[in-house]
Image (cartoon, rainbow, N blue to C red):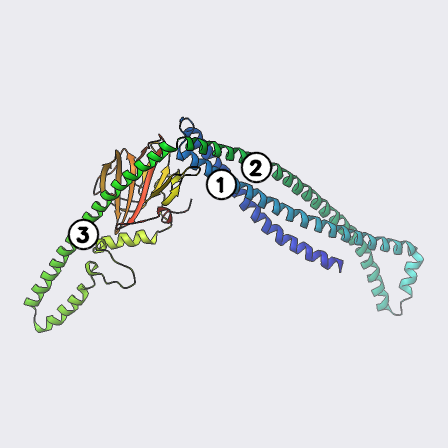
Amino acid sequence: MIRKLFATITCLFIVFAVCAQETKEDIKQKQEQLQKEIADLNKTLSQIKSSKKKSLSALALVQKKIAARNELINSISKDLNRLDNTIYLNQVEINHMKLELDSLKANYAKSLVFAYKNRSSYDYLNFIFSATSFNDAVKRIAYLRSYKQYRETQVTTIQKTQDVLQGKIATLTSNKAEKKNALVDQGKQLNVLQEDKKEQSDVLKDLKGQESDVASQIKQNQRDQQKLKSALQAIIKREIAEQQKEAARLKAIEDAKKIAAANNATTSSNNNNSKTNNNSTTSVANTPAKTNRVYSPLESTEEGLTSSLAFENNKGRLPWPVSSGLVTIPFGSYTIPGTKIIGSSDGITISVPVGTSVKSVADGTVSAVFDIGGQQAIVVRHGKYFTCYSNLTSIKVNKGTNVHAGTVLGNADKAADGDGQVTFMVMNGNNYSNPESWLRPR
């Protein structure tokens, strides 16, 4: 009974140990990622600290660092829970192994007592010769040999069980030491978290002291953004007009072909012309809406429709326009913590080091390169969708340039607060959508 219970506990422990090992690896990997993220944030923050003015970028960095620190502490807590479970199961297995070892030793002791009482050669011979038949005597000899092997097996089993028990005790000791180190690490991270919160408080205090300056910067940004929106609407309107003109030209060509075919056709060829006419209605220029999808005049050509669908199908998986950086101004309405400042944005503003390469997020064609409010901007068309990248310098493309996902468009320029940043927008015609919903999670 004890052996069956021991076997069951051992199987459960093995299953748990495998799962715990996987969980441990996942937890450690997550902790390493978070520690690297925190180190990168500290590096960027130290660059920003060189400025006398505290900026929104500094606030966003500190807040991001606090969030990462909290996540790291939670990860350590998960690791501690895993260690507690491992220690508990190890202790349970050790207790059952001790019971099993005690049982093995008790049985072996009984066999030794029995062997001692029947140690004489006379008893051995008497046991054999008292057999009622030859076959019975052979069975008794086999029994005595088996009994001897059984005692030897008992010794081997006891030794192996003792070795396994010592290994489990060593593992338990290691688990307890690992838990102790994790508790120390958690304590350190909690202390650093308090320092991060104090740093956030200092930045908020400085920003509040500069509230009028920050407010004027935001108002200026919104004025520039309004100018940018007007420019974008004009660009999109122009693109639609050009696309409609092209669609009209293609339709005129198709109509001319139909008229020529009708004038020259015979009775038999009229049937073929009918098929041709039916086929021509399926051209991309007159693509029927087979689904509830709303088609745009910008999709009146095969190229435009293909580009739109490619952009749509990659929603949530598009690469970021910059390889690093932090969103300091989100899409939509936002407030500045610790102040009464309220703003709104039709895109996202990403804080990056000055000179960071800004890349196209998808294949498309450059619709416009222009200057507005002292900052350069680029608009890339992807069928009926448009992406806009502003606050750039060192422009690398021109209007009409075909670009791919990852093509460098320019570099991030300085903002009013001296930090580098780029503003990124996504539009479906004149409708703006949250760019982060199109980009892959970081």
- Please give left or right for residue 208 compared with residue 366 in the image: right
Mark 2 secondary-structure assignment: helix
Going from N to C along the chain, the mark reached first, 2 or 3, is: 2
Instruction: State the residue at coordinates (55%, 42%).
Output: 28
Identity, as a three-letter code, of the amino acid under mark 3: Gln
- Please give left or right for residue 142 compared with residue 321 in the image: right
The answer to which quarter of the image holds residue 252 is bottom left
Instruction: State the residue at coordinates (11%, 62%).
Output: 255
Q: Please tell me how crowded label 3 is: few (under 14), some (14-19), or many (20+) other residues with Cα within 10 Å.
A: some
- Please give left or right for residue 39 compared with residue 252 in the image: right
Q: Can residue 395 be spotted in the picture? A: no
Q: Which mark is residue 67?
A: 1
The picture places residue 254, in percent across and down from the top left corner, at: 13, 60
Instruction: State the residue at coordinates (25%, 58%).
Output: 295
Mark 3 secondary-structure assignment: helix
Identity, as a three-letter code, of the amino acid under mark 1: Ala
Work out which quarter of the rendered image holds the C terminus and state it: top left
Q: Which mark is residue 243?
A: 3
**Spatial distance from mark 1 to mark 2, Cα to Cα?**
12 Å
The picture places residue 325, in percent across and down from the top left corner, at: 39, 37
Going from N to C along the chain, the mark reached first, 1 or 2, is: 1
> Is disc 2 in contact with disc 3, using a CB cutoff of under 8 Å?
no
Identity, as a three-letter code, of the amino acid under mark 2: Leu
Q: Please tell me how crowded label 2 is: few (under 14), some (14-19), or many (20+) other residues with Cα within 10 Å.
A: some
Q: Please tell me how crowded label 1 is: few (under 14), some (14-19), or many (20+) other residues with Cα within 10 Å.
A: some
From the viewer's perspective, is the residue at label 2 or at label 3 nearer? 2
The picture places residue 213, in percent across and down from the top left corner, at: 36, 31
Residue linked to disc 2: 190
Instruction: State the residue at coordinates (41%, 46%).
Output: 441
**Spatial distance from mark 2 to mark 3, Cα to Cα?**
59 Å
